Image: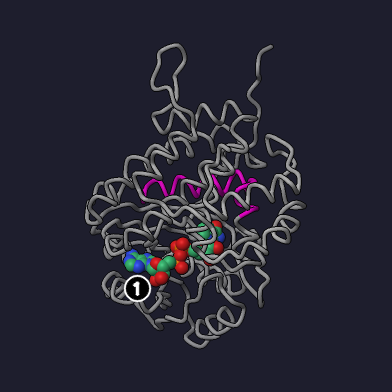
């Protein structure tokens, strides 16, 4: 039986300017082309130095450094008031996913255009997804108004990202790629982006670990971060993201590290039921076999685990603050969110076993 290719794919309207050492010049040009003359710069205190450098030539009316992970509503409200008080007509965010997230929270209510300058591999800059937290409850939504109009990528701005954070953030991007292979709106275009993202992360991250100032490695990881987020934005949240969303929200675990740890367990769970995704992922890692000509003999999980080993990736959720007693409730919260399109059915028992293994750092194949 022939497999007809049939899909509907939306490309998101965004300009991507990529150039190491060129953020300041690219920002100046892009802010000008938006016609903006009153810029609000959003950067956390830790990234203030980087932000001052690349925004020095912009018509800045206010600088805002009150950035908090997962965007608490009161933090969003203060930022919105600051934007309104200054009469800002554009937002420039310089930082990781938390900083981009705050810019999105302002755009959501004020409709201001965002120019995002990412300094991690989280990928929020390439999605129309916003997130806000109220108490322990994280709400996310999709709105085209929060999609940055322009992304300015400059790998020199990621040089200072410490190696453990670079590894966790890079594996967060890898998780976008892997999950895109079976997420609800998976299609061949997402898969192509995701496969190239995996290849580029697997090439770049070891270089970053060997030398955090390796520009080629940093560029490969940053380029892959864009691909991964684009694939994720289009494919939607698969099982992996549903699990991490609950762990991040209800259990307050750090975002990138949670993704880095959970990924091999989801891959081990889904891969046997998703042979095409498994083949594609394995090939991207250089471990799979290609048609009849053998390329390698390993599985997708072998590829991931070899990379994780090389990167000395975080291993167990208990090391980043998950309490074992929280597992049953977390499993119950994840279960109703599991996408019906997941390649294999998922029970509460499956989720408890998966979370327990990820909690202790057990071998994902057992
Ligand atoms: P983050 O933005 O909180 O940054 C992590 C840490 O790295 C912070 O301490 C920050 O100050 C530091 N840092 C960032 N860039 C640095 C640099 N160049 N040098 C030195 N230190 C640097 O973490 P993150 O993982 O980038 O983002 C996580 C957040 O983004 C979460 O809230 C998550 O939900 C959100 N997110 C959203 C989307 C989306 O599509 N909406 C996608 C991915 C992540």
Does residue 230 sit above or below 101 in this rendering?
A: above
Horizontal side, residue 54 vs residue 36: left or right: left
Please provide the residue range marked out in magenta.
Answer: 221-243
Where does residue 263 sit, x and y in percent of width and height?
A: 53, 46
Q: Which is more toward the observer, 236 or 205?
A: 205
Where does residue 212 sit, x and y in percent of width and height?
A: 25, 56
- Give the quarter the ligand 1 occupies: bottom left
The quadrant of the image that shows the N terminus is top right
The extreme bottom residue here reads 85
Q: Is residue 234 magenta?
A: yes
The quadrant of the image that shows the C terminus is top right
Asked whether residue 93 appears in the rendered view, the answer is: no
Does the numbered disc 1 mark a residue whose Cβ is under 8 Å from ligand 1? yes
Where does residue 43 sit, x and y in percent of width and height?
A: 40, 74
Q: Residue at x 37, y 79 (%)?
A: 45
Q: Main secondary structure of the magenta part?
A: helix
Quadrant in which residue 220 is drawn:
top left
- The secondary element bearing badge 1 is classed as helix
Q: Is residue 57 magenta?
A: no
Does residue 27 sit above or below 200 in this rendering?
A: below
Q: How is the image coloured?
A: one colour
Which residue is under mark 1?
47
Total number of numbered discs in the rendering: 1
Q: Which is more toward the observer, 221 or 360?
A: 360
Mark 1 burial class by Cα count in 10 Å: few <14, some 14-19, many 20+:
some
Where does residue 108 sit, x and y in percent of width and height?
A: 60, 69
Does residue 78 sit above or below 50 in this rendering?
A: below
Asked whether residue 265 appears in the rendered view, the answer is: yes
């Amino acid at each position: 039986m022939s497999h007809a290719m049939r899909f509907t794919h939306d490309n998101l309207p965004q300009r991507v300017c990529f150039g190491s050492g060129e953020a300041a010049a690219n920002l100046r040009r892009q802010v000008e082309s938006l016609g903006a003359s009153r810029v609000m710069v959003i950067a956390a205190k830790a990234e203030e130095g980087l932000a001052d450098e690349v925004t020095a030539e912009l018509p800045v009316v206010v600088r805002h450094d009150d950035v908090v992970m997962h965007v608490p509503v009161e933090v969003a409200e203060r930022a919105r008031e600051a934007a309104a008080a200054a009469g800002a007509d554009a937002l420039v965010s310089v930082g990781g996913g938390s900083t981009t997230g705050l810019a999105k929270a302002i755009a959501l209510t004020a409709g201001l255009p965002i120019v995002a300058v990412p300094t991690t591999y989280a990928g929020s800059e390439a999605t129309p997804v916003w997130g806000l937290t109220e108490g322990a409850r994280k709400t996310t939504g999709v709105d085209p108004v929060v999609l940055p109009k322009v992304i300015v990528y400059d790998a020199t701005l990621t040089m200072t990202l410490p190696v453990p954070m670079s590894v966790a953030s890079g594996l967060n991007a890898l998780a976008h790629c892997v999950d895109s292979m079976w997420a609800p709106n998976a299609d061949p275009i997402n898969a192509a982006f995701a496969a190239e993202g995996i290849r580029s992360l697997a090439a770049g991250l070891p270089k970053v670990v060997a030398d955090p100032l390796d520009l080629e490695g940093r560029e490969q990881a940053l380029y892959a971060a864009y691909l991964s987020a684009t694939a994720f934005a289009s494919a939607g949240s698969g099982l992996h993201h549903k699990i991490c969303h609950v762990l991040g929200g209800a259990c307050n675990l750090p975002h990138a590290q949670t993704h880095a740890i959970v990924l091999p367990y989801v891959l081990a769970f889904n891969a046997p039921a998703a042979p095409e995704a498994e083949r594609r992922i394995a090939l991207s890692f250089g471990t799979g076999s290609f048609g009849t000509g053998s390329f390698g003999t390993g599985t997708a999980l072998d590829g991931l685990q070899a990379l994780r080993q090389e990167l000395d990736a975080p291993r167990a959720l208990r090391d980043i603050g998950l309490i074992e007693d929280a597992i049953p409730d977390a499993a119950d919260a994840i279960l109703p969110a599991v996408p019906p399109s997941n390649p294999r059915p998922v029970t509460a028992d499956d989720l408890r076993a998966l979370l327990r293994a990820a909690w202790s750092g057990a071998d994902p194949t057992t």
